[in-house]
Image (cartoon, rainbow, N blue to C red):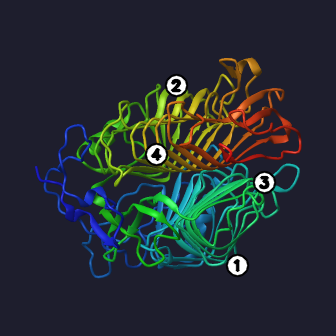
Amino acid sequence: MSSFRAADSAAITGSASAGASAADSRPPRRNRGSGTRPAEGGGLSRRSFVAAAALATTVPVAGAATPALAQSPGAKGHPHAPAEPDFGPNVTVFSPDTPTADIQAALDAAALEQVPAEFGTSRYAFFFKPGTYDVDAQLGYYTSLAGLGLLPDDVTINGAVRVEGQPQPGGGDSALTNFWRSAENLAVVPTGGVNWWAVSQAAPLRRVHIRGQLFLFPKMGGFSSGGYIADSLVDEQVLNASQQQWLTRDSTIGSWSNGVWNQVFAGVQGAPAQSFPSPPYTTLPTSPLSREKPFLYVDDNGGYRVFLPALRQNGVGTTWSGGTTPGSSVPIDRFFIAKPGDSARTINKALAQGKHLLLTPGIYRLTDTIRVKWAGTVVLGLGYATLTPVGGVVPMTVADGRGVRIAGVLFDAGPVNSRVLLEIGGRRGGRTDPRDPASVQDVFFRIGGAGPGKTTTALIVNSDNVLLDHIWAWRADHGRGVGWTANTAETGVVVNGDNVLATGLFVEHFQKYNVIWNGDRGRTIMFQNELPYDPPNQAAYRHHGVDGWAAYKVADSVKHHEGWGLGSYCFFNVDPTIHNAHSFEAPVRPGVRFHDLLTVSLNGDGVIDHVINDFGDAAQGTATVPVNAVEYPAS
């Protein structure tokens, strides 16, 4: 049995922070219980892929009335070059030689299907090889669009990569339910100078270069609620307008205008100065710790690889402002490319052999748990690949260990209760490395909405040294299978590990505590929460003589914890007389501090009596005005 070779992971450029190199670039060590990746058998040689010459290898969008695009056997003059990877029927790859009309037709067909399909079953990913394209890409639900260059400017879209507001029955538009779509690793030269990205939760912009302005609200001025930008450059102004909450991290912007409630910036050049609550800007000069999401790209030989950005400390601006992002990469043949028909058993066999996992778009119905056992394993979902448990199984567990990366996955609870949907680390904790933390990025959880769903907890983090970077855990407030006794879910996120950092934590509508933080030295940069809409009465929403449940609870045993830019809202529309004692609950000690907290009663449907513990006035009344706590404990 041959060892996993360091040569199979190519270092790209730059010097990273200590311990920041990807796990695959290190020789393996077999440490009992450490979760180190096993040696790979068979002495597999590294394959190289050759770029298509005339046309991209393109699989038409399922059901789209678009011209079929030819598949090239290899580069010009190399007819025996290996074919491109089989990413399945829901991934389309374009090249600059693909006719513009064909690209536009494929994008339009997907938009026609997906823009209204909030709880639909289709999933799509569109990739663009390096070059320039003149297209208008409107993204609907469960649609991802990305460039395949090593730098965002390797792929330029002249036109738009946009999300529009949804028309409302009484007129106007809204982005309040524009969830589950993404764009990354490309540049946009927007028509008219403005690119519109009217979204709410689970719709990230990553590694994008907007060569103009970026507007985050619907064109007709409707509401929008929550979003995320990371590692991006916007040449001109970002206009927030109706966005109620937003996190921008490790980016550069021309300027920022406006804000509704909590607008949070960490390591952003051009960010507005700290001014909470008026304007409601929480601004950290740096991101204390970050590591960007893995992404697919095509190398100079036409081979597909997954880039693994390095760990970054005290980051400011984009990781690629001086050239290629520091990090390493792994060839695609080191990944098991899963399709929705693959069973957990098939996936686990590949993981046990030391493969990484690429989940192509679709819905995976799992009758067993996907078990990520080895340190350094990468699990990357494309096009909102969705894991749905059958019979109450846990969809995925991750063993304690260094450098595991879970990214781009939607967990959708099944009708039989699962104990948890994703668990990071063993229940007793285990060996981890602060120089090479595990990361969970663009990972989303849904309980109900698409149909009945039940779980006790969406996400449990037992490991120390974990980065949670853009998480949305949502107990559905609308859709199918929704109700106090229908889509039951006690808690969104439980953190038991120490030294866990969350950047962009969105957790909504859970029936007890939305977040429980038991680990020490935890930090959260930007938290957004709505309490459950649907408690039938106060008796059903009360515990140990206390009205309601905190949205964010720090355990009494915790000695050090810090949070910046945290908001919680109530909308008890079944019984508007319900009170919640406080949205934030934490021990009172010097090492536990919060900055820029707020609570809001939406339309006066319910009351939050205090902001944190017994501190802060009541959020109540129809004016929908925040109650703020700038510092806690108050200095």
> Is disc 2 in contact with disc 4, using a CB cutoff of under 8 Å?
no
Sequence order check, earlier mark of 2 and 3: 3
**Other residues around mark 3 within 10 Å, as few (<14) / some (14–19) / many (≥20):** many
- Depth check, mark 2 against mark 4: the one in front is 4
Residue name at image x 35 percent, y 74 percent: 51
Of residues 590 and 630, the one drawn nearer to the viewer in this rendering? 590
Disc 4 marks which residue? Answer: 500
Sequence order check, earlier mark of 1 and 4: 1
Amino acid type at circle 1 is Gly
Q: Which mark is residue 193?
A: 1
> Is disc 3 in contact with disc 1, using a CB cutoff of under 8 Å?
no
On the image, the x and y values in percent for residue 5 come to: 18, 59
Label 1 and label 4: CA atoms lie apart by 40 Å
> Is disc 2 in contact with disc 3, using a CB cutoff of under 8 Å?
no
Disc 2 marks which residue? Answer: 417
Label 3 and label 4: CA atoms lie apart by 32 Å
- Depth check, mark 3 against mark 4: the one in front is 4
Residue name at image x 88 percent, y 38 percent: 621
**Other residues around mark 4 within 10 Å, as few (<14) / some (14–19) / many (≥20):** many
On the image, the x and y values in percent for residue 619 come to: 80, 39
> Is disc 3 in contact with disc 4, using a CB cutoff of under 8 Å?
no
Label 3 and label 1: CA atoms lie apart by 22 Å
Amino acid type at circle 2 is Asn
Sequence order check, earlier mark of 2 and 4: 2
Label 2 and label 4: CA atoms lie apart by 27 Å
Label 2 and label 3: CA atoms lie apart by 34 Å
Q: Which mark is residue 201?
A: none
Sequence order check, earlier mark of 2 and 1: 1
Q: Quick check: 584 above or below 335?
A: above
